[in-house]
């Protein structure tokens, strides 16, 4: 997948309805999933035809969703391999400019096509909404570029059926996993993994998620339903982290299983890992500030305040000893104290709002 892996960012600008109309030249297996309800308030029927359409798979047990953007070179093979392990294969074509939708349909997938490139998170939202509409038992999401091995799909499904965990993550970092990720990528992912776990307050090693950025995941019916209704999940690659915050917010248990991932694919992500990491880091910091204001702001605020008082004391001692007023030290002391007090005040306000929303049963997370 050139821009739609868990390690890359798709260029997208916002999201409109879940799925819009597709071009007339696309085969009849490619269909729009209408997001607006009909006048009687019921969800409209998907426009499909053919033996492999969504209507032919009433309430499938296992649905595999594949977000795809300009993946005509690999999507057909991925769909055919995935179909061996799924009751229904859904390809979410995120406004591709090539023949991704046609190749996917020819390979046997049901295709939901976005009218424009809206982002990885928007494609996941379409997958959750579709899975909820079909009342699937297991929704497995994997990449379209061939990096993930479709033979691992049953492993995730079995783990979910056995443990009843709403989320099962295919991990590159647990025992038994096989991955040829470059060294710099492994280091970057481990840093992001640590920061993501800490941002959720997960400190104990036996409770941490080893691969927070894996795009190979399985969701059960309960997780599908709540995720389909969560409007706080972003449209970009930070959606992967947003979903984990959602899972943590609902106290869902998480299981991880080893998977095989190869980066030796022709159409692998071209996204700069550094820029991807900065986007993830920014999202983590925003979440910490929103969910844990006392930790994110109050502690640094107290530190700055006391530091400023220390610098102020130093300035006073210097003045007494030399008789010369230390302008630089004095200004530094005032600055540190003011910033520290402001941070503490902001933390108290945010914490009060968070407590109010929680007590009122309102999810205060917003974008």
Image (cartoon, grey):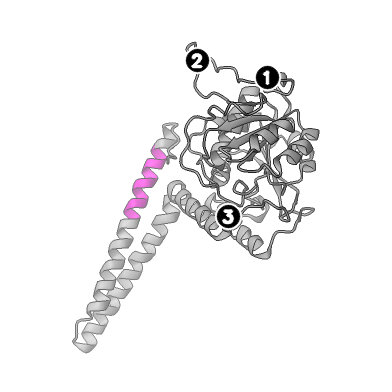
Q: Element type at marker 2?
A: loop
Q: Main secondary structure of the magenta part?
A: helix
Of callouts 2 and 3, the N-terminal one: 2
Question: In the shown orientation, is residue 76 left or right of residue 226?
Answer: right
The quarter of the picture where residue 80 lies is: top right
Closer to the camera, 204 or 271? Answer: 271
Q: Secondary structure at mark 1?
A: loop
Q: Residue at x 45, y 35 (%)?
A: 363
Q: Nearer the viewer, mark 2 or mark 3?
A: 3
- Whether residue 345 appears in magenta in the rendering, the answer is yes
Within 10 Å of the Cα at label 1, are there few (<14), some (14-19), or many (20+) other Cα atoms?
A: some
Q: Position of residue 16 (x, y in %)?
A: 47, 32
Q: CA distance from mark 2 to mark 3?
A: 40 Å
Residue plotted at (65% across, 48% down) = 214
- Give the label on residue 354, or none: none
Q: Residue at x 37, y 51 (%)?
A: 347
Closer to the observer: label 1 or label 2? 1
Identify residue for label 3.
271
Which residue occupies the extreme front position in the image?
Answer: 25
- Which numbered disc flags the more N-terminal residue, 3 or 1? 1
The range drawn in magenta is: 344-356
Q: Residues within 10 Å of mark 3 (few under 14, many from 20)?
A: some
């Amino acid at each position: 997948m050139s821009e739609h892996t868990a390690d890359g960012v798709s260029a997208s600008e916002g999201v409109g309805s879940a799925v819009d109309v597709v071009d007339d030249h696309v085969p009849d297996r490619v269909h729009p999933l209408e997001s607006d309800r009909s006048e009687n308030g019921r969800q409209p029927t998907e426009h499909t035809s053919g033996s492999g359409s969504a209507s032919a798979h009433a309430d499938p047990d296992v649905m595999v969703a594949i977000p795809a953007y300009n993946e005509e070179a690999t999507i057909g093979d991925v769909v055919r391999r995935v179909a061996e392990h799924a009751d229904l294969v859904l390809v979410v074509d995120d406004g591709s400019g090539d023949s991704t939708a046609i190749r996917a349909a020819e390979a046997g997938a049901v295709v939901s096509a976005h009218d424009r490139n809206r982002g990885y998170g928007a494609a996941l939202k379409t997958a959750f909404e579709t899975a909820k509409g079909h009342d699937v038992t297991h929704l497995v999401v994997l990449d379209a570029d061939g990096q993930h091995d479709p033979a691992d799909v049953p492993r995730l499904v079995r783990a979910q059926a056995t443990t009843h965990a709403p989320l099962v993550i295919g991990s590159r970092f647990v025992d038994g996993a096989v991955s040829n990720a470059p060294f710099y990528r492994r280091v970057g992912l481990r840093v992001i993994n640590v920061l993501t776990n800490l941002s959720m307050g997960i400190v104990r090693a036996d409770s941490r998620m080893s691969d927070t950025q894996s795009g190979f995941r399985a969701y059960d019916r309960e997780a599908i339903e709540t995720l389909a209704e969560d409007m706080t999940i972003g449209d970009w690659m930070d959606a992967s982290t947003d979903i984990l915050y959602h899972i943590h917010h609902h106290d869902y248990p998480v299981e991880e299983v080893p998977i095989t991932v190869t980066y030796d694919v022709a159409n692998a992500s071209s996204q700069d890992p550094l820029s991807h990491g900065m986007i993830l880091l920014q999202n983590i910091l925003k979440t910490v500030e929103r969910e844990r204001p006392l930790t994110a702001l109050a502690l640094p605020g107290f530190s700055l305040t006391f530091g400023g008082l220390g610098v102020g004391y130093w300035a006073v001692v210097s003045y007494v000893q030399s008789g010369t007023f230390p302008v630089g030290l004095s200004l530094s002391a005032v600055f540190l104290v003011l910033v520290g007090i402001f941070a503490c005040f902001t933390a108290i306000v945010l914490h009060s709002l968070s407590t109010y929303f929680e007590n009122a049963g309102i999810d205060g997370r917003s974008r």
